[in-house]
Amino acid sequence: MGKRWGVFLGLFVVFLVLTEMGAEGGSLKRLISTREDLTSLALTGYSGGFAVVREGREVSLPKGEILLLLQGVPERIEPESVEVSVEGGEVLEQTFSTNLITPDNLMKAYVGKKILVAVKDPETGKETVKEVKLLSVAGGPVFETDEGIATTLKGRVIFPRLPEGLVPEPTLSVSVRVPESGKKKVNLLYTTGGFSWKATYTLLYDRDKGRGSFGGWVTLKNETGADLEGADVLLVAGEVGKVRGPSPLRAKGVYTTLAAERAGAGVSEQPLFEYHSYSLPERVTVRKGESVQVRFAQSLPVEIAEEFLLEGGNRFFLGSQHGTTENLPVRVFLLFKNEKGKGPGIPLPAGTVKVYAPGGRAPLFLGEDSLPHTPEGADVRLALGNSFDVQASRRQVSFERVGREIYESSHEVVVKNRKRRDVRVIVRETLPGEWRILSSSHPYTVEDASHARFSLTVPGKGEVTLTYRVRVRQ
């Protein structure tokens, strides 16, 4: 509706009576608590885009029953999740309001009521104030004046008083009964939407040395509508059951990067029910509308091995494909162990790993892959794409039906290596039904009920041919 008020050509909003929040309505004494009263702030961020927040405030409260206005809480707060406690006091009632003081809301509140319009004479400079009635704001404001019905007015609008229920910022109103006056601890616990996090990683890989340098960041995005200053942050990985509310708003605003004071300072991981939680090493400030990156791993040495993988389908085992040659991609993987001395050696939240190689003048991007939640001591396997220098083809040499739904077939897989160095290539065959390899030119292992695994060492500038015969019962 903001553009619709452009018809006022310089309309200015003025309050004649607005000295205190308690200027009208209600018999309880009102007391305002702002973010300056915060003594502690802790939040737990979840993968589902929400957070559980615990606030501690210290407020001077008078004796008796008062209305405590807690300002600075998130706009995306879930009102039914709010739990408020007051030291030595009793909480009687609580209300959450995001009905903010804006020109739009003021106009809506005064529909059917009289307002004042001050018009200045351009020649004399004298200002005349007249009373008009606001009839509607649907599609634009409509006024009833002495001259008739008007849709535009020149001048500044004066609202006689602040309508009850409008607040300058999201506010939690709490009715409290306090037996003794003094400074009291006020604790808030609530759930808010609009808080999300993700982990991202970089791996600088030196193939000649078989080593790399590993770094990690956690990105915190605050779309809650409130500043989160000096917060202790715990992050939970896992799909937590929760009834979904409205989708988070698209992020806008500042993007800030923070680094932990200690190089390589890592998150600490703790099991949490069926999930995993990660505690950030430093307190973090994330203002509303901002995204903040917190480094939790920096330049950690990693020992890396390469794996070349060739995977075949199962269509060659249940029907004749005689004479058909199929070219197959050979995928490249980087392998390392997440343990100190060989890898990062810290718990790694799920995220994306971008892999680079040192180039002559600038780093080269090699690829990226998703990293699942990886505890310390686990194996890491990153897929980078298909090899250019290692290529493979396969063909069915023979096929015959030897019984009811029983087939025997012979296969040939040729792997060519254009590199100068030797490479190890894993051939992973997917076999249907009940199967048994009758003969093979190379050793193999049974990976599971559907896969056989061959390991081939292919010399530089050379090739290797794998042959085998298999019986399949469908």
Image (tube, helix red, strand yellow):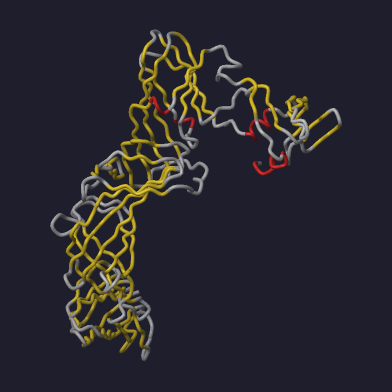
Q: Say if 431 sits above or below 274 in the image.
A: below
Quadrant that contains the N terminus: top right
In the picture as drawn, the residue positioned furthest to the left comes out as: 341
Q: Is residue 187 left or right of residue 205?
A: right
Q: Say if 133 sits above or below 211 in the image.
A: above
Residue name at image x 69 percent, y 40 percent: 5
Rendered location of residue 108, percent (x, y): 68, 32
Q: Nearer the viewer, residue 241 or 459?
A: 459
Q: Nearer the viewer, residue 62 or 408?
A: 62
In the picture as drawn, the residue positioned furthest to the bottom comes out as: 323
Residue name at image x 46 percent, y 44 percent: 289
In the picture as drawn, the residue positioned furthest to the right comes out as: 147
Q: Say if 105 sits above or below 417 in the image.
A: above
Q: Nearer the viewer, residue 145 or 40?
A: 145
Residue name at image x 47 percent, y 27 percent: 71
Rendered location of residue 419, percent (x, y): 23, 83
- When asked about the image quadrant of residue 90, the answer is top left
Rendered location of residue 237, percent (x, y): 33, 47
Q: Say if 195 sits above or below 315 in the image.
A: above
Q: Is residue 137 left or right of residue 23?
A: right
Q: Is residue 234 left or right of residue 249?
A: left
Q: What is the tally of numbered marks visible in this picture?
A: 0
- When asked about the image quadrant of residue 39, the answer is top left
Q: Nearer the viewer, residue 220 or 270?
A: 220
Rendered location of residue 12, percent (x, y): 66, 33
Q: Is residue 443 left or right of residue 318?
A: left
Quadrant that contains the C terminus: bottom left
